[in-house]
Image (spheres, rainbow, N blue to C red):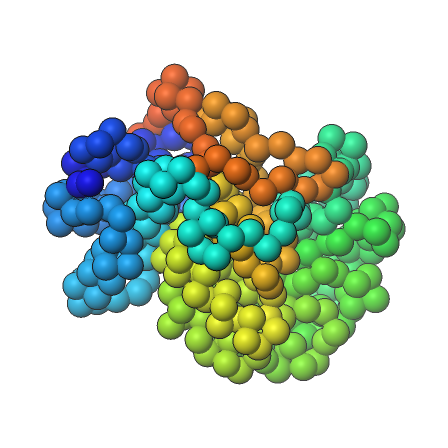
Amino acid sequence: MKITRLEMFHVRPRWLFLKMHTDVGIVGLGEPIMEARALTVETAVREMERWLIGQDPRRIEHIWQTLYRSAFYRNGPVLTSALSGVEQALWDILGKSLGVPVYQLLGGRVRDKIRMYGWIRGVIAEEYINAIKGSMREHGFTAYKMGPIPAMRMIETPAAMARIMEFVAAVRQAAGDEIDIGIDFHGRTSPALARRLCRMIEPYHPMFVEEPVLPGDTLALKELSRATTIPIATGERLFTRWGFQDIIEQEAVAIIQPDLSHAGGILEVRKIAAMAESRNIAVAPHCPLGPIALAASLQLAACTPNFLCQEHVTLGETYLKEPFKVVNGYIDVPTKPGLGIELDDEKVQAGLFDGKWDNPKWWLEDGSFAEW
């Protein structure tokens, strides 16, 4: 079996889909995407394509090692995002060629269903509360994540801190104690501010606090983890097992959140999860992306003992022939070969755009740039 060509499609709202064709007619799907840099990642995939054409797609580890190490400059969001989408497509091809789901090739499933958590959005607490109630009626989620942290200065006023605490308190009261709520700080707080905020919201028992400080500051994460009972989570902006090595060895967090479209793909994240398992650290894959990335994440969740819950922003209603179904907050472990999904090509064509999308930009009141 040989790889013959690659196709890529920019689809709304901001996703990049990959089709990897072979000489036996099997087509693998992947999602090589980096938010606001999809055009850059597309170029990186095209550069990889020159060597990929003619390769046997079943030699997944060999291809991964060659693409990663031959670049000389390793790691980083662009290279590993491009590599991640390529790797997902390779696993899809291998699973389809053998007639089994990807997780069957990674040791088999360790669970029957996969816990999902929903994203809730709004401006005021009432909008978040209404979103939770509507989502619970429709899908029965038992966990949600929200981002109530605005643009923050390095040290904030008591009033600003109190507003966040009141926001969290209102959502907790409305949701009740049977619902888990994760709080995404999005790297917007300094270590000092994060410690103070965690102490203030601790009585409302968040499921986790995500990215309380910017990635790469292992010492701050470790100190914060020791200063609060709230589980600390991070990892969406870390890449490959080498990027996760320090926070795992230092036991700096309770939960890691590798993104299968950024961190190196399915097998690389499975390796990262195994490293975390040795330190009793849970895995909750990051996935605010499209349905192919979600499908890859579900394959990982099925075979990973220390999996916690799965983020998502779509169930594939827009682009999949058979979208995923959530029942009482869970998706049944997929059973179809490969990634277990099939794109609806007509819908993909209808969703095409030029790939130009920018992250929001935030500024503080003095005009200086703020973390988004």
Is residue 328 in view? yes
**Viewer-side residue, 125 vs 19:** 19
Give residue 351's position: percent from left, percent from top. 40, 23
Q: Is residue 185 above or below residue 190?
A: above
Determine whether 159 is above or below 136 in the image: below
- At 44% from the left and 55% from the top, the residue drawn is 106
Residue 241 placement: quadrant? bottom left
Name the side, left or right, on which 357 lies relative to 297.
left
Q: Residue furthest front?
A: 98
Q: Position of residue 36 (x, y in %)?
A: 38, 45
Compared across the picture, whether 148 is left or right of 204 comes to: left
- The foreground one among 238 and 70 is 70
User: Where is the N terminus found, in terms of image quarters?
Assistant: top left
| Residue found 25% across the figure and 29% down from its top | 25
Q: Nearer the viewer, residue 325 or 124?
A: 325
Residue at left 27%, top 48%? 58
Q: Is residue 231 left or right of residue 322?
A: right
Give left or right: position of 366 versus 53.
right
Q: From the viewer's side, name the closer residue of 159 and 239.
A: 239
Count of marks, rendered view: 0
Residue 155, quarter of the rendered image: bottom right
Residue 296: image x %, image y %?
Answer: 46, 46
Q: Is residue 8 visible?
A: no
Q: Residue at x 16, y 36 (%)?
A: 4
